[in-house]
Image (cartoon, rainbow, N blue to C red):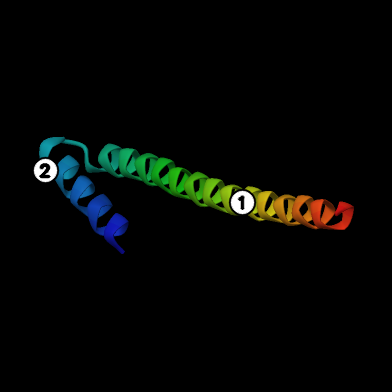
Amino acid sequence: MFVIQKLQIILDNRIQTQKNPYFSRFIFHIEFIFLENKLMKKKENEYRRAEKEEKRQKMEKRKKYKKEAKK
């Protein structure tokens, strides 16, 4: 919701400052696409980090069980 409000403000500012509102809307859509991609990449990175953390914890458990089995 916050991102959409921010983009609306950007669009309003561009329409006021430029003579051609269609060009301004085009710029707005490009900025929106970039922001959307940025958010998607951020979510993908968070997901990858979570997967790596799960794998690391599993490996630690395996090592712990192997050490206990050797004793």
As shown in the figure, which amino acid type bears the numbered disc 2?
Gln
The answer to whether residue 19 is left or right of residue 65 is: left
Q: Residue 6 placed where, x, y %?
A: 24, 52
The answer to whether residue 64 is left or right of residue 11 is: right
What residue occupies the far front of the structure in this picture?
71
Crowding at mark 2 (Cα within 10 Å: few <14, some 14-19, many 20+): few
Kindly state the secondary structure of the residue where label 2 is placed.
Answer: helix
The residue lying at 51 percent from left, 52 percent from top is: 43
Give residue 38's mark.
Answer: none
Q: Residue 13 placed where, x, y %?
A: 14, 44
5 and 58: which is toward the camera: 58
As shown in the figure, which amino acid type bears the numbered disc 1?
Glu
| Position of the N terminus by quadrant | bottom left
Which callout, 1 or 2, points at the residue further toward the start of the chain? 2
What residue occupies the far bottom of the structure in this picture?
1
- Which of the two discs, 1 and 2, sits closer to the camera? 1
The residue to which callout 2 is attached is 16
The residue to which callout 1 is attached is 53
The Cα atoms of the two marked residues, 1 and 2, are separated by 48 Å
State the image quarter where residue 15 is shown: top left
Crowding at mark 1 (Cα within 10 Å: few <14, some 14-19, many 20+): few
67 and 5: which is toward the camera: 67
State the image quarter where residue 19 is shown: top left
The residue lying at 37 percent from left, 46 percent from top is: 32
The residue lying at 11 percent from left, 43 percent from top is: 16
The answer to whether residue 62 is left or right of residue 55 is: right
Q: Residue 42 placed where, x, y %?
A: 48, 47
Q: Residue 45 placed where, x, y %?
A: 54, 45
The residue lying at 75 percent from left, 54 percent from top is: 64
Kindly state the secondary structure of the residue where label 1 is placed.
Answer: helix
